[in-house]
Image (tube, rainbow, N blue to C red):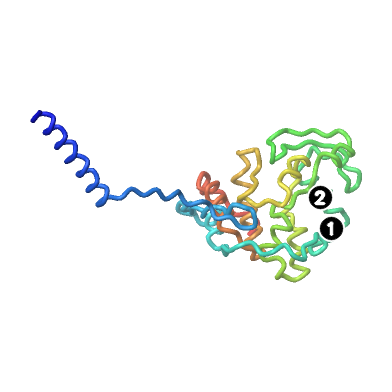
Amino acid sequence: MNYQKRRITAFIAMVLGMIAWLVINPISFEPEPSPVVANGNVEPQDVIETPAVNAPKGSALEILENLVVKGRAPKTGYTREQFYNGWPTVDGCNLRQRILKREFGDSAVLDGCTVLSGEFDEPYTGKHMVYEKREDITKSVQIDHIVALSDAWQKGAQNLTAEERYQIATDPLNLLAVDASTNQKKSDGDAATWLPPNKSFRCAYVARQVSVKYKYSLWVTEAEKNAIVTILNTCPNEPAVGI
């Protein structure tokens, strides 16, 4: 009998001890905070800044540090005509044909200024492309604005003069002959939202974007800069171009 009383007494003491511990150390049952939702969209998380390695003089990394970082402005008022209205004629030749000739090099077969056939290493896919007819070039090759015009508009170009915007749209530094279907996927993306599938070209690609933005006093977003730094940290000696 005494043995049973001792067991009951010990059990009661254990229960009282647990109650006392819970009073001192309460367990929180608060749920994890939910993502902030605005207009039906989950707000993006804060960008974790990627520090740049030591930037060599004249490198794209060095130039990148001179770009203003701030948010994207509204796209209100943007049209391509704010920049240009079709490819201009430069020294007697259409600018599109000039860029094709630059990329095709010695393989280009010309009829005056017009590229009829040729081949080149397409930069966005990394494939070697051969064209035997002008119609194939027209259908399959586009001249891309490396810094998309609508991206430029939202990052400072709307504050520039019409002449300065025209220069952005027609500057060979900002123009590249590329595969049409791949260029359509890029659309107006910046480095934070699109990079060439050809990874070996990414360093040169973002270096050109940095160079164009520096030349025309355009800015980058924090996410964009972070993406560019991530690429250029793998090739810190990649030079800025045309500056």
Precedes in sequence: disc 1 or disc 2: 1
* Amino acid of disc 2: Arg
On screen, residue 22 versus residue 114, left or right, reads: left
Point out residue 7 in the picture as x, y percentages from the top left corner.
14, 32
Quarter assignment of residue 36:
bottom right
Q: Indicate the quadrant containing the C terminus: top left, top right, bottom left or bottom right.
A: bottom right
List x then y, in percent, for residue 123.
69, 40
Closer-to-camera residue (194/84): 194
Q: Position of residue 89 (x, y in %)?
A: 87, 57
Q: Position of residue 220 (x, y in %)?
A: 60, 59
Q: Furthest residue to the left?
A: 2
Instruction: Answer few, some or many: residues within 10 Å of disc 1's Cα (few below 14, many 20 plus, some between 14 and 19).
Output: few
Residue on which the image places disc 1: 90
Q: Is residue 81 above or below residue 228?
A: below
**Distance (Cα) linking label 1 and label 2:** 8 Å
Amino acid marked by disc 1: Val
In the image, what residue occupies the spot 68% across and 51% down?
189
Left or right, 175 with reference to 49: right
Give the camera-side residue of 240 and 81.
Answer: 81
Secondary structure, mark 1, is strand
Specify the label residue 98 is tagged with.
2
What residue appears at the point 10 percent right and 28 percent down from the top-left corner?
1
Q: Residue farthest to the front? A: 1
Tell me which residue sits at (52%, 57%) in the image: 62
Vertical comparison of 18 with 157: above or below: above
Quick check: marks 1 and 2 in contact, CB under 8 Å?
yes
> What is the number of callouts on the image?
2
Residue at coordinates 85% horizontally, 60% vertically from top-left?
85
